Image (cartoon, grey):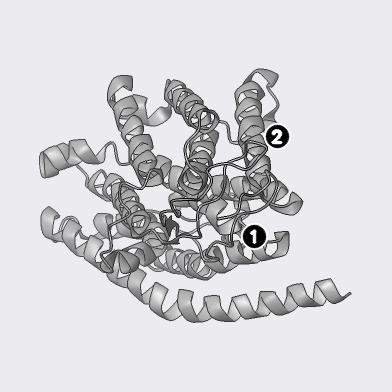
Amino acid sequence: MKAIPLDAPPQALPAHAPTAGRPVAPAADAPTASPDGAPAARPAPTRLLILDGLRLAAALLVVAHHLVRGPWGVDPGTLFGPLAAAASFGWLGVNLFFLISGFVICLSSWGRGLGEFAASRAVRLFPAYWVGVVLTTAVLAAWPALRGPLPAPESLVNLTMLQSGLGVTDQDWSYWSLGAELRFYLLFAIVVWLGVTYRRVVYFCSVWTLVAVFSTTWNQGWLNNMIVPQFAPYFVAGVALFLIHRFGSNLLLWGLVGVNWLIALYRLQGYPPLEHFQQSWWSVAALVTGCFAVLAAVALGAFQRVGWRWLTVAGALTYPLYLIHQAIGQTLIVALRDRVPHWPLLAGIVALMLGVSWLIHRYVERPVGARLKRGLATSLAAVRRN
């Protein structure tokens, strides 16, 4: 395998997201570094199914948090016992999502131009999101057991996914995390515009880490909004772990992971869920550390032999499930909690959400995503010609 210069991109990686690759062992005579000391890229990987499983696990954590701890009219602990106590930590599923997102976005952007990167994100995010917004709005309007929908202008602007920038309430409260994701994409788009290379990604991780730390003391509201300092450590660590997965370990990359792990633990202090659920910093810090450790194991190839094909379907359900579960699920709880026993009601709602998620994936994401991809490809070609 030929050594590469520091700024040369590695072999092309799979274009689809959010997936990652299974490492293929380099040849015995393959160099580990180029003459200038930069690590050499490993051969292009295939799909890492374990990430699909982790994404589903993260989604189910969030679902449990919102539904088990939902509006049952009594203390959920009296209904669900230990499950309610465990579900109180389910908000950490979003933190795990952000770690995985840093990993897979770095993977999916390699070898792409800015237009292709933006198009891939639109194809991945919008078809299911549009359905999620419409379904949530319709359920809240037809069955306002929990609350009614937002006013029409706010409901409509939710379709853009830009509502957080306009200060508009999310139609489903879970959509707040999509605003953080979009800001990460916008920041990483700078690297994509320049051309994604090992060196530029390392610089990006280093600069974002420092700016996210000092943005708090600068007390600039707009900067904090763009930099997302509360969650930047998860995105940055995920990106650095992808570099470890793709190029191998070195002190600099592990240093980036370690520093951002420590910052993430520090930022847990005073975080609202800890106070609301009366959770100790130590318990939450241990769980966050576990999330970092699991993705580090993925980066090091610990799960490369995992090949259960059902994980592909599981991963496909994750995003639609996240989009539809909270407002609709809690509306069903409020409407039916006095008519249906709590355990069957909870199980039925989760089963319903999984079934609807599969329908969205099969009959919306796949066909609409394919058409959107073709349309955006044609549009980008027209931009390049003129």
Residue 75 visible to an observer of this rendering: no
Residue 217 drawn at (x, y percent): 65, 18
Badge nearest the viewer, 2 or 1: 1
Asked whether, in this view, residue 28 is left or right of residue 204, the answer is left
Helix, strand or loop under label 1: loop
Binning the other alpha carbons within 10 Å of mark 2 as few (below 14), some (14 to 19) or many (20 upward) gives few
Residue corresponding to mark 1:
111
Residue 138 drawn at (x, y percent): 44, 69
- Give the residue type at disc 1: Gly
Residue corresponding to mark 2:
222
Asked whether, in this view, residue 238 is left or right of residue 64, the answer is right
Residue 34 visible to an observer of this rendering: yes
Residue 250 drawn at (x, y percent): 50, 33
Q: Residue at x 63, y 44 (%)?
A: 198
- Give the residue type at disc 2: Trp
- Mark 2 or mark 1: whose residue is earlier in sequence: 1
In this view, the residue in front, 303 or 6, is: 6
Q: Is 276 placed above or below 382 here?
A: above
In this view, the residue in front, 107 or 33, is: 33
Q: Which quadrant of the figure contains the N terminus?
A: bottom right
Asked whether, in this view, residue 243 is left or right of residue 345, the answer is right
Q: Which mark is residue 103?
A: none
CA distance for labels 2 and 1: 31 Å
